[in-house]
Image: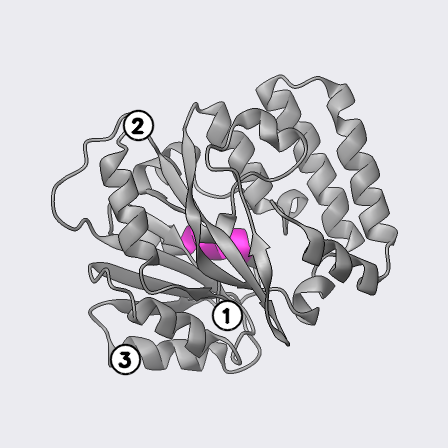
Amino acid sequence: MRHTNPAGEPKVSVIMGIHNCEKTLQEAVDSIRRQTYTNWELILWDDGSTDETYEIAKQYAAEDPARIRAFHDGQNRKLSHALNQCLRHATGELVARMDGDDLSRPDRLEKQVSYLQEHPETDLVGTQMNRFDENGHAGVLRAPLQPEPEMLRSKTPIHHATIMTYRSVYEALGGYTESETVEGVEDVDLWFRFFEKGFKAATLDEALYDVRMDREALKRRTMGRRIRSLRTRAAGYKRLGFPRRWLLKPACTLLLKGLAPAWIKRININRRDG
């Protein structure tokens, strides 16, 4: 799709689904408040937290009501639901993702907006990611500069948390799939549907997003999640007309990763480059 990009600074809606992240939320929100790009709004949807996450979100909304809004419905209905609720309240032409335990570099939004304005044929732009853990910086997770559908054969070619896209793209896709079958792999499902619609993506060759890869993050990589990933890929391969034999490699990879002990998983993460 070729977009007509207005001159000036289009409004960016930053959407953040949050759940039990009281220890990290302040850093995440402050990283948005420090952006060099100023025409943004931040929409926080609390997904049934049992700690002080929502109280922290409400405090930020009270301090900056013109740009920050906080919502919740008291239930834990998972990330896809939270992000869809954020999208319902978004008023910007552009939408950027952000997680409640990560950080955005100060010039992230500015550079992504500029890229989309300069490349009207591009529907979505992500960035590279810096990893950090309990010990500090732990390397860079790289994504291809020009993601293509066939790359879904072996990996996820777009860093979900780093993306900026048009609100119209989310509308065309119907937002995120709210189903237990894609819980934890809602991004994989999104990319198959994104490419099925013929949309085009790009990734900036800069690490403008810091992703937390500590012990808690590793705990979320359960066998159940890996099985859902494989099933989501099977459905996605069918959508894009990929041969079924392509499932063999991800099936073996997911099985081996699922059986590996935590210390081996950490070594594998530290060796990744894309």
* Label 2 residue SS: loop
Mark pair 3, 2: CA separation: 39 Å
- The amino acid type, in three-letter code, at marker 2 is Glu
Residue with the mark numbered 3: 62
Mark pair 3, 1: CA separation: 19 Å
What segment carries the magenta color? 79-85
Name the residue nearer the viewer: 190 or 171.
190
Residue drawn at 35 percent across, 34 percent down: 123
- The amino acid type, in three-letter code, at marker 1 is Gly
Residue drawn at 30 percent across, 27 percent down: 121
Labels 3 and 1: the sequence-earlier one: 3
Residue with the mark numbered 2: 121
Q: Position of residue 81 (x, y in %)?
A: 50, 53
Q: How many marks?
A: 3
Image quarter where the C terminus lies is: top right
Could you tell me what secondary structure mostly forms the magenta stretch?
Answer: helix
